[in-house]
Amino acid sequence: MSEYFENRGVMRALRALGFSLKGLRSCYKHESAFRQEVAITLAVVPLGLWLGEGGVEKAMLVSSWLLVLILELLNSAVEAAIDRFGPEHHKLSGRAKDVASAAVFLAISLACLVWGLILGPRYLG
């Protein structure tokens, strides 16, 4: 079979899945923040599915936290790519890392806001 056919369809999708799983394992192994967020996810996702009233609320509660994991993966990728070039500090490298970290912070803030707006009035008001 030619390389053209090997890089298409199901085999391509399976290889892509393998790369994705490898990335998740690598991030879990090397990034303590990601491990902490995964631990929170194990509690937050079932809680969101239980506390949400209807599909939209459940989706908002769960997806707002899954966005944190997605951005943590991207943050880790930025850090790894920059660290590949060496330990010396460069202004642009520092800026890139800070911006990626800020994205994670905003995702966590968004998740807290979503959870507060959906569940706050129900349980605090």
Image (spheres, helix red, strand yellow):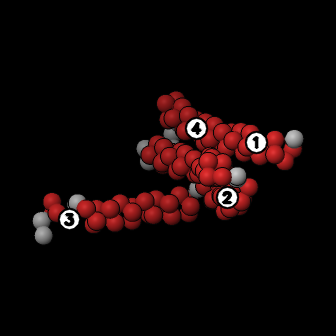
The residue mark sitting in front, 2 or 1, is: 2
Q: Amino acid at mark 2?
A: Leu
The residue mark sitting in front, 2 or 4, is: 2
The residue mark sitting in front, 2 or 3, is: 2
The quarter of the displayed image where residue 111 is located: top right
Residue 18, label in figure: none
Quote the CA–CA distance across marks 3 and 4: 37 Å
Instruction: Tell me which label, 4 or 1, sits earlier in the chain.
Output: 4
Label 1–label 3 contact, CB within 8 A: no
Q: Amino acid at mark 1?
A: Gly
| Image location (x, y in percent) of residue 71 | 55, 45
Q: Nearer the viewer, residue 35 or 30?
A: 35
Instruction: Tell me which label, 1 or 3, sits earlier in the chain.
Output: 3
Count neighbours of disc 2 (C-alpha within 10 A) and say few if under 14, some if 14 to 19, many if 20 or more.
some
Count neighbours of disc 3 (C-alpha within 10 A) and say few if under 14, some if 14 to 19, many if 20 or more.
few
- Toward the top, the furthest residue is 91
Residue 6, label in figure: 3
- Toward the right, the furthest residue is 125
Label 2–label 1 contact, CB within 8 A: no
| Image location (x, y in percent) of residue 8 | 23, 60
Q: Is residue 19 visible?
A: yes
Dot 1 falls on a residue whose secondary structure is helix
Instruction: Tell me which label, 3 or 4, sits earlier in the chain.
Output: 3
Residue 49, label in figure: 2
Q: Is residue 65 left or right of residue 122?
A: left
The residue mark sitting in front, 1 or 3, is: 1
Q: Nearer the viewer, residue 83 or 2?
A: 2
The residue mark sitting in front, 3 or 4, is: 3
Residue highlighted by disc 1: 116
| Image location (x, y in percent) of residue 18 | 39, 65
Dot 4 falls on a residue whose secondary structure is helix
